[in-house]
């Protein structure tokens, strides 16, 4: 691009829209990789925890999710060191905040319930009479679906919105119906529909 | 009557830089260079012109041990860009009649 002060109004408008569109595509590309990256790790760990739960000792293996967070964030940090920097935009920041809030909420819920499961915290802290059954996977699936649907609304992408709704409601229903180790297979399906599929959709749309 | 176009923005490269910065909070020099396809020298000169006019802010910092130049649009630049687009519309409206 060279110095040219004799542009037509049409050319000026073309430059503005080209640059805004290019910047949007770069942000979307970065976002799609984030969704696919986390989606794959959730699927891998859901299947691993499900298998270990079924064959080697029960739900205590849910603590492995903490390892997933470490691998996920560690990998993101490592990739950020080597890949070309992408400038923060209002859209990328908002989507980051949506998924960040989701991570904090479900991380907190998972941690507290994990401590209760290990008898470090009393069950009465969450359930006063100690007899109500709470299925965390169904709650997490619902939050997952909401975060995914909101991402679809921010990106104005109908397919991502639908993926989020299916992941959230389907996961909520599925986890309630399969409350034991099978709920982690539901979690894997939720991650595929709510993270990997939207990531792929955004990625393919960008390439068009 | 046409509204005069801001001569500082009415240049391909400077307009491209401003358009990039309008959608990003801040951008690093290599990113702007890659997106606009400009040479480092030319881009540097145009960024200086925009910074001198107060349209953008340039921050020289370090990323680890590497020097890093960050550019961000200022409220003055934002206003100038809005005015430029408004002026541009008047040309396009006349052109389409």
Image (tube, coloured by chain):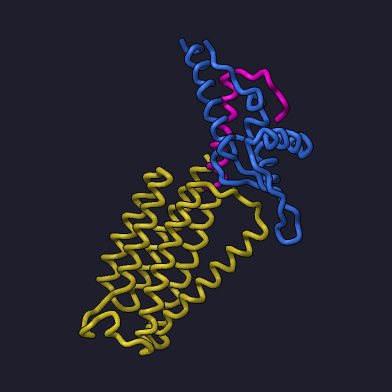
Chain colours: A yellow, B blue
Q: Give the percent coordinates (x, y) of residue B7.
A: 65, 22
Residue A3 on the magenta span? yes
Residue at position x 33%, y 74% in the image: A182
Left or right placement of residue B76 versus residue A179 in this view: right
Which stretch appears magenta?
A: A1-29
Which residue ends up furthest to the right in the rendered image? B41
Left or right placement of residue B96 versus residue A77 in this view: left
Residue at position x 68%, y 37% in the image: B51
Residue at position x 46%, y 72% in the image: A45
Tell which of A184 and B87 is nearer to you.
B87
In the rendered image, which quarter is residue A101 located in? bottom left
Left or right placement of residue B11 versus residue A158 in this view: right
Q: Give the percent coordinates (x, y) of residue A17.
A: 54, 31
Q: Give the percent coordinates (x, y) of residue A25.
A: 54, 42
Q: How many discs mark residues in the rendered view?
A: 0
Q: Give the percent coordinates (x, y) of residue B9.
A: 63, 27
Question: Measured along the vertical axis of the image, is residue B90 above or below residue A28?
Answer: above
Question: Measured along the vertical axis of the image, is residue A142 above or below residue A198?
Answer: below
Tell which of A21 and B7 is nearer to you.
B7
Tell which of A206 and B10 is nearer to you.
B10
Residue at position x 60%, y 40% in the image: B73
Question: Measured along the vertical axis of the image, is residue A39 above or below residue B20?
Answer: below
Left or right placement of residue B54 versus residue A45 in this view: right
Residue A83 on the magenta span? no
In the rendered image, which quarter is residue A155 located in? top left
User: Quadrant location of the N terminus of chain A?
Assistant: top right
Question: Measured along the vertical axis of the image, is residue B95 above or below residue A49?
Answer: above
Give the main secondary structure of the magenta stretch: helix
């Amino acid at each position: 691009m060279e110095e040219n002060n004799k542009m037509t109004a049409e050319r000026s408008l073309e430059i503005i829209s080209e640059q805004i569109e290019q910047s949007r595509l770069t942000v979307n590309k970065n976002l799609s990789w984030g969704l696919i990256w986390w989606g794959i790790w959730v699927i891998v760990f859901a299947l691993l925890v499900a298998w270990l739960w079924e064959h080697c000792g029960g739900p205590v293996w849910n603590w492995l999710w903490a390892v997933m967070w470490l691998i996920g964030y560690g990998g993101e940090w490592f990739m950020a060191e080597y890949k070309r920097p992408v400038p923060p935009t209002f859209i990328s920041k908002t989507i980051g905040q949506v998924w960040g809030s989701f991570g904090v909420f479900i991380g907190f819920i998972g941690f507290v319930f994990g401590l209760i499961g290990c008898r470090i915290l009393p069950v009465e802290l969450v359930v006063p009479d100690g007899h109500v059954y709470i299925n965390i996977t169904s709650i997490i699936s619902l939050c997952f679906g909401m975060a995914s649907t909101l991402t679809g609304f921010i990106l104005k992408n109908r397919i991502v919105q639908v993926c989020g709704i299916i992941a959230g409601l389907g996961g909520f229903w599925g986890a309630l119906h399969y409350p034991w180790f099978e709920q982690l297979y539901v979690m894997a399906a939720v991650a595929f529909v709510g993270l990997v599929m939207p990531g792929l959709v955004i990625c393919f749309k960008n390439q068009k | 009557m046409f509204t005069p176009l801001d001569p500082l923005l009415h240049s391909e490269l400077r307009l491209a830089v401003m358009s990039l910065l309008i959608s990003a909070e801040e951008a690093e020099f290599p990113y702007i260079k890659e997106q606009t396809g400009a040479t480092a020298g030319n881009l540097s000169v145009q960024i200086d012109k925009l910074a001198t006019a107060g349209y953008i802010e340039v921050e020289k910092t370090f990323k680890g041990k590497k020097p890093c130049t960050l550019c961000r649009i200022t409220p003055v630049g934002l206003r100038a860009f809005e005015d430029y687009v408004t002026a541009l519309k008047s040309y396009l409206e006349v052109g389409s009649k």
